[in-house]
Image (cartoon, rainbow, N blue to C red):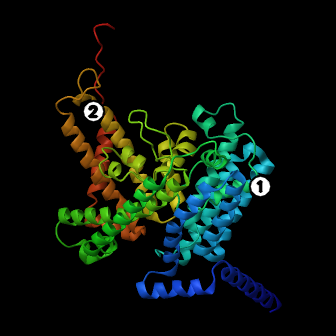
Amino acid sequence: EAMEGALRSVAGAWNATCAAVDGIATPAVVTEQLAKLSADTGISTPEIRLFLCLVGAYPVAALWRALPGATARHAFSVVTGWWMLQFILGYQWLHCIIPSFLVYLSMAVVGPRARYLTFAIAFGYLTGGHIYRQYTDYLGWTLDWTMQMMVVTQKLSAIGFNYYDGNAQDASASQKGRSFKTLPSPLEFFSFVLFPGTLAIGPAFEFTDYRQFATGELSSPNPMVPSLWRFVQGIALFVAHNGVMMYFPTWALLTDKELLSTGNVVTRFAKIWVSLLGYRFKYYFGWKVAEGAAVMSGLGYNGTDKVTGKHKWDRVENIDVIGYETSQSLRDSASCWNKTTNLWLRRYVYERVRNGVNLYATYFVSAFWHGFYPGYYMFFLSVAVATQVHRNFRRAVRPRVMNDDGKTPGPMKPLYDVFSFICSNVTTNYFIISFVVLAGDLCVNAFMSLYFIGHIVLAVAFGVFGTGFVRPPKTKVSAKTQ
């Protein structure tokens, strides 16, 4: 009884402390107005808070860019970033700070060799959050700290390797370009982690990029127009998302047994295809709005185009909408989707795992980063196999539709491009079903309604192109080399 009483006292003190901090960080009048707005619109208060931070990141990023000197920018990042986390999450901001502190401590104690330890700390903490959320809110969509921690995990896992690369002899030129030799100060480290312009939902970026812009080593022209253009794109995509969901609600189409049995397989997949397009618009909305804030800070600036001379603002670009929706291969699709995350996976997983297993390791880490629902692993591992099949298909077929020089397209090349586009688009929209519904039984029901056609075709294609049954044509030897 004494122990229970002590625990209740500790819990009460903790709740009182959290309430006091919340009251200081967010005045009661603001909290009341947010609750009223939630009641009037039907949108949850956490979602409203998140959206306000996405929009508020624009003036915050502009102010960060206007501050004189690195120290002022670092201090501003820490204070403002903490407040944003507090505003969105309440006391849960601690779950982003604790692993960050442990990563910094490990680099300070172990030194550059701590790269695997930092990776394990970041992923280990995120893993605990995913498991707890899945256990307490199965298939729920309540906002918690794991969203922000996913972005922080990218930063923490990358910075350990950056520190190692700066002191390693075997680092590549590109790895050296992202590296540093000496441990940054705690202020600089936490300002990087808590940078308010992209803290809410990303995008993540390299520590060296942040340091160069914060110190003034890199600068940008006026970012107002490209930044606001991304905001406009995001709002337009949000409107489009809601328009599609009115007629093709994704969750209902993929989980309602009656809808899964209505019509024939072609019409069912056509509806699902349209619905998933609208579903992606929600992601495009968030990414574009967040990307605009990164551009407003200057971090999105990437020099000038060598051909056109125009300014490029794609250093932290999250999504290439047109590129993704019109891609002709799964590799191109992946490079256009959640681009900063894919860069992180390529730089810190794919390029650091031995050939032969690096593709599968990368997709597995991506699934692990997302969480532990079966749908994530069904999607990413299926796409890994499909990507390998497409690589083999391209090696075997593409040379046959090119001219003898291997560079200029032959008369059948346009047909090959159209076929590649259809295959890539259908493959993505079929297998992504499991990414959306997540639960294993729901995934099986959805795929069963489509008779597992995608899985059957993939298995056949793997047998044809993955076993050497169809091989690339022999390279023609020119007369000069005979």
Question: Residue 73 versus residue 143: which sits nearer the camera?
Answer: 73
**Left or right: residue 30 compared with residue 433:** right
Question: Residue 141 versus residue 462: which sits nearer the camera?
Answer: 141
Amino acid at pointer 2: Arg
Quadrant containing the C terminus is top left
Q: Residue at x 55, y 78 (%)?
A: 136
Between disc 1 and disc 2, the foreground one is 1
**Quick check: can you spot residue 456?**
no
Q: Are marks 1 and 2 in contact (CB under 8 Å)?
A: no
Which mark, by number, is residue 181? Answer: none
User: Where is 292 relative to 9, above or below?
Assistant: above
Amino acid at pointer 1: Leu
**Quick check: can you spot residue 326?**
yes
Q: Quadrant of residue 92?
A: bottom right
Residue 413 in percent (x, y) is at 21, 34
**Left or right: residue 372 compared with residue 455:** right
Q: Residue at x 47, y 84 (%)?
A: 38
